[in-house]
Image: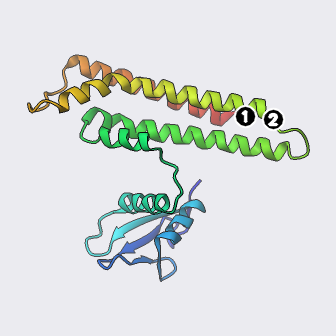
Amino acid sequence: MAKSNGSDGGPVIIKKYANRRLYNTATSSYVTLDYLCQMVKDGVEFVVNDAKTGNDITRSVLTQIIVEEEAKGQNLLPIDFLRQLIGFYGDSVQEMLLPRYLDHSMKMFTHNQEQMQEQMRDSAGGMFPMGQLEEMGRQNMAMFEKAMQMFSPFGDQATAEKTTPEPEPKADAGENNQISALEKKLDALQAQIEAMNRK
């Protein structure tokens, strides 16, 4: 769970200036991207605002941290994943559903990782419970594959539409029904994650 260390109990406010310098208003000091990276790892919640406009630019700064970490050799994002993610930009259906799916999937992965760490701590004096961890990994992969299949009908359609110069037509009733079905499946996925968290 993220910790709020701001003066008012809310998230820490970071200001980004035109010279790209980052200023931590809680500590009244300039900080670096590495510092913000450590804040994320420590679970400290923060918001980055443009010092001139006041706009929230947290998303772009977090993305920049990921780019910096990847450049250091911390390659957590597979090439195929990045290509697929880029391909989803500009597709209104995917842009609406994919963020929810990724959020749910990351919560599930984090839950499984916490369970693995607990298993490792509990079994420190005995045999490592590989069977339980392998089963957990299988469940995780099955959930990912199931969720990715939900998006596959739109993938081929999106590719075909992008090869034609005609403007994209508005969603018809059939497409709206497909979107509703996907949203229900995402809700079911969220319910499964919450059920796992309650165990």
What number is the disc on residue 129?
2
Please, what is the three-letter code of the amino acid marked with disc 1? Leu
Which quadrant holds residue 196? top right
Image coords of residue 20 (percent x, y): 35, 76
Which quadrant holds residue 92? top left
Q: Residue at the location (86% across, 46% down)?
A: 124
132 lies left or right of 159: right
What number is the disc on residue 42?
none
Please, what is the three-letter code of the amino acid marked with disc 2? Pro
Task: Measure the alpha-carbon separation of dots 1 and 2.
Answer: 7 Å
Q: Residue at the location (72% across, 41% down)?
A: 116
187 lies left or right of 2: left
Q: Residue at the location (54% across, 57% down)?
A: 74
**Vertical position of residue 95 compared to residue 195: above or below:** below
Image coords of residue 17 (percent x, y): 33, 77
Could you tell me if the residues under marks 1 and 2 are in contact, i.e. CB atoms within 8 Å? yes
Image coords of residue 150 (percent x, y): 41, 24
Which quadrant holds residue 163? top left
In which quadrant will I find the C terminus? top right
**Vertical position of residue 198 compared to residue 86: above or below:** above
Residue positioned most to the top: 174
176 lies left or right of 142: left
Q: Which residue is mark 1?
A: 133
Q: Determine whether the residue tagged by mark 2 lies in a helix, strand or loop.
A: loop
Q: Determine whether the residue tagged by mark 1 lies in a helix, strand or loop.
A: helix
